[in-house]
Amino acid sequence: MKVLGIESSCDECAAAVVADGREILSNVVATQIPFHAAYNGVVPEIASRKHTEWISGVAAGALEQAGLGPGDIDGVAATARPGLLGSLLVGLNFAKAFAWARNIPFIAVDHMLAHLYAPRLVLPLAGPGTPAAAIPPDYPFLGLLVSGGHSIICRVEGFDDITVLGTTVDDAVGEAFDKVSKFYGFGYPGGAVIDQLAGAGDSGAFRFPLPQLGKPSREAPGGDPSHRYDLSYSGLKTAVTAQLEQFRVKPRAKATQPEFGHGMLSEADKADIAASFQKTAVEILLRSLFRAIEDTGLRTVVTGGGVAANTYLRARLAEKKDLRCVFPPLELCGDNGAMIAGLGYQYLARGDRSPLSTTASARVRAFKH
């Protein structure tokens, strides 16, 4: 079964064709980064307008790349939640129209579940000697979903069966990366820029505090167990942007150029801020994840979302030789249509269908406190 997947939940306009839920035949992603860079963040109105302009051409490009015509597609899947409502509606309505016009089944899927499915996909062969695809992880496993909009630790029992154990009580980890990058003028998108800057920095230059959720109180002397796996990034963001000097360990380097609003920051200072912030942001994730591993006994962790491309996160998990840590290929960490098509196949193969009256939802209640 060849499924066309449409993804438009945020600022990436994407379409892909996947065969039998596993083999990627095409994967086209049109990025809007140049249109949002001036604002150091995604502008919803610009995003939805660009999706409207591009969606038809992106879908046509996915079919052409796969060497297929519209009549060769057996089903259509599209992201319906969560995301920016205007952007979601563009891709969702295009997918419904395509399915209606071809009289083929349509399925609406959850964007975050699709990120968990991404490591099960097989990329096209790059040439002789290309390694075989990794063996997909068996259920159950722990999922770590990290992006600009979500930070979720969950128990995964099946492709559409997850139990959220912990999530952010305020900012998502990717959002914190973007806000710190914007504050210091590092560049956009913040996650990729900080990751690159951190490579030249000293992660011990600043010792930022970890949040203390569920700490003991008079009402709960042992701490609030409901926050055992939860995450928080507002405190770290404040420490990095408003209280930086309180957490400095390494002596400050001599300034080489002015930085508006921040006195004088040398290039070494910038790299140190990026490295120290990145380390703390990832350690916040890992502290809660390791608690979940300890409590559930599950030794397989599947990571998805844009922050899954972070080099420090990958390196830290690679140190855990007693765990099987599964990451999608870098090109499948961000938003893409292949993960939507792959997940959609599983629903369609089971006989599920979505009515053409299906609409979009900006949020999933269980994903955020």
Image (cartoon, rainbow, N blue to C red):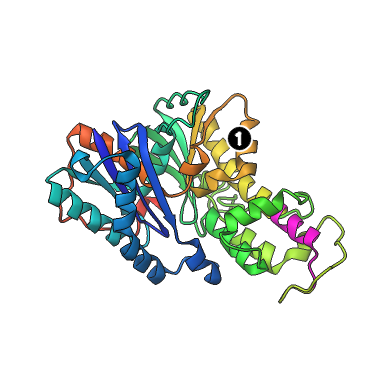
At which x and y percent is residue 343?
32, 39
Which residue sits furthest bottom? 261
In this picture, residue 352 sits left or right of residue 66: left
Question: In what element is the residue under mark 1?
Answer: helix
In this picture, residue 56 sits left or right of residue 304: left
- Tell me the residue that label 1 is attached to: 317
**Residue under the image location 40 percent in, 70 percent down:** 46
- Residue 316 in sight here: yes
Boundaries of the magenta span? 264-275
Would you identify the image quadrant in which residue 12 lies? Answer: bottom left
Name the foreground residue: 297 vs 363: 363
Name the foreground residue: 39 vs 74: 74
Amino acid on which the number 1 mark rests in the picture: Leu
**Residue under the image location 33 percent in, 39 percent down:** 66
**Residue under the image location 57 percent in, 53 percent down:** 218
Would you identify the image quadrant in which residue 190 lies? Answer: bottom right
In this picture, residue 54 sits left or right of residue 129: left
Question: Which quadrant holds the C terminus?
Answer: bottom left
At which x and y percent is residue 29?
41, 51
- In the rendered image, residue 282 lying in the magenta stretch gets the answer no
Would you identify the image quadrant in which residue 222 lies? Answer: top right
